[in-house]
Image: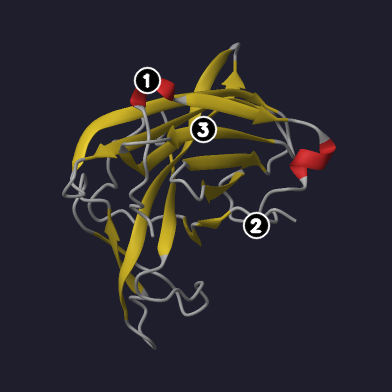
């Protein structure tokens, strides 16, 4: 589930790094999605929920900002959760722990940064969502329902676009507009440059 309800403590948010070769192979396989990162999720048996970001590009990521939302008892979005991961070399990953015990959380969005002229510059913005409707044989490949904090958006695909099932969790990727600041929600009428499944991290 995309908005998975998991126990957590907001004060116990952690950024966990794994940079050894053995750890680097313990993620989902690299997907060529044009976003420079592969994103997957980790859910523990007792409710832990984390988001893992692997650098699939050729340049180190200066920073990755991950925003989650704390969910109330009814599953509605409450206050945001912000975790920043820094200095992720090519082929390596770091993990943001969003939830532990006794609270609930969900992934909202991710912004990636590369170093340019000595300062981090935003490259891509990724929004978590789920497929709400599939229209086979149509150029409108799927309608996407992001988290309740944003409402609805529509992604237009081509006949060769990846096929996704209704209810599937996904990531919508957009390049950050030149000179612009990262957005907090998908821009109306702007089609994502990449729509990829948001899957659990592989352990082998």
- Residue position for label 2: 31
Residue 171 in percent (x, y) is at 44, 54
Could you tell me which residue is drawn at 52 percent across and 77 percent down?
160
Position above or below: 144 against 164: above
Is residue 4 visible in the rendered structure shown here? yes
Mark closer to the chain start, 2 or 3: 2
- Residue position for label 3: 96
Query: Which of the pair 86/23 is nearer the observer?
Result: 23
Q: Is residue 161 left or right of residue 166?
A: right
- Residue position for label 1: 11
Could you tell me which residue is drawn at 51 percent across and 72 percent down?
162
Residue 126 in percent (x, y) is at 43, 44
Could you tell me which residue is drawn at 37 percent across and 56 percent down?
2
Mark 1 lies on a secondary structure that is helix
Which residue ends up furthest to the bottom in the rendered image?
Answer: 137
Query: Which of the pair 143/22 is nearer the observer?
Result: 22
Give the spatial CA distance, label 1 vs label 3.
13 Å
Is residue 181 visible in the rendered structure shown here? no
């Amino acid at each position: 589930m995309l908005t998975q309800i998991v126990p957590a403590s907001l004060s116990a948010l952690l950024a966990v790094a794994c940079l050894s070769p053995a750890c680097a192979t313990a993620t989902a396989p690299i997907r060529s999605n044009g976003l420079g990162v592969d994103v997957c999720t980790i859910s523990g048996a007792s409710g832990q929920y984390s988001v893992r970001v692997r650098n699939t590009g050729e340049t180190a990521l200066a920073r990755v900002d991950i925003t989650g939302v704390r969910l109330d008892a009814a599953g509605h979005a409450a206050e945001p959760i912000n975790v920043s991961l820094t200095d992720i070399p090519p082929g390596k990953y770091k993990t943001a722990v969003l939830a532990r015990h006794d609270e609930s959380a969900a992934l909202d969005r991710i912004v990636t940064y590369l170093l340019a002229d000595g300062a981090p510059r935003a490259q891509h913005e990724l929004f978590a969502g789920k497929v709400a409707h599939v229209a086979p044989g149509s150029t409108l490949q799927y309608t996407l329902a992001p988290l309740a904090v944003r409402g609805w958006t529509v992604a237009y695909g081509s006949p060769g676009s990846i096929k996704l099932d209704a209810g599937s969790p996904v990531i919508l990727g957009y390049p950050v507009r030149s000179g612009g600041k990262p957005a907090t929600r998908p821009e109306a009428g702007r089609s994502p440059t990449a729509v990829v499944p948001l899957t659990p991290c592989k352990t082998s």
